[in-house]
Amino acid sequence: MKIYVTSVFVDDQSKALEFYTKTLGFIVKHDLPLGENRWLTVVPSEAPDGTELLLEPSDHPAVKPYTNALVEDGIPAASFKVDDLDAEYKKLRALGVKFTVDPMDAGTVRMAVFDDTCGNLIQLVQMNNR
């Protein structure tokens, strides 16, 4: 069994698409009309057949209290693995990404957390070589 699709709730799919593709470097896998919204997934450019990230509309009434609580408590909605956290941090900061947690050691990983501008905190992790 493998994870096929996972999702983050976004308050604006077009804005999320812009951020996740132009800023983070993901590529669009699917962008299909679905009623008032879209089935909108992105994948890493280096893994086009990998797990898809669904940029899920946040219009269900339960979503806003849930995502607000996560952000208020500093809990990331998703975690993305990178090879070089410091380089990724520097690149994203230069693109205007706002980090809520700067790179730090956290047990078996180095990690940082940023605001995706669409209602979520996203964690970046680099595995420590131990």
Image (cartoon, rainbow, N blue to C red):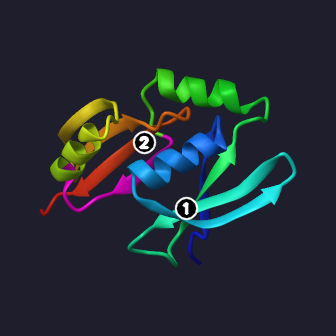
Of labels 2 and 1, earlier in sequence is 1
Q: Residue at x 66, y 67 (%)?
A: 30
Q: Residue at x 42, y 42 (%)?
A: 122
Residue type at mark 2: give it.
Ile
Separation of disc 2 and disc 1 at Cα? 15 Å
Q: Is residue 57 left or right of residue 77?
A: right
Residue type at mark 1: give it.
Val
Q: Secondary structure at mark 1?
A: strand
Q: Is residue 33 left or right of residue 78?
A: right
Q: Nearer the viewer, mark 2 or mark 1?
A: 1
Which residue was labeled with disc 2?
122
Residue 92: quarter of image? top left
Tell me the quadrant of the picture where the N terminus can be found.
bottom right
Q: Position of residue 39 (x, y in %)?
A: 73, 58
Q: Position of residue 25 (x, y in %)?
A: 40, 58
Q: Position of residue 38 (x, y in %)?
A: 75, 54
Q: Is residue 94 left or right of residue 129?
A: right
42 part of magenta stretch: no
Which residue was labeled with disc 1?
42
Q: Is residue 83 left or right of residue 124?
A: left
| Mark 2 vs 1: CB contact within 8 A | no
From the viewer's side, name the closer residue of 105 and 58: 58
Residue at the right extreme, as displayed: 35
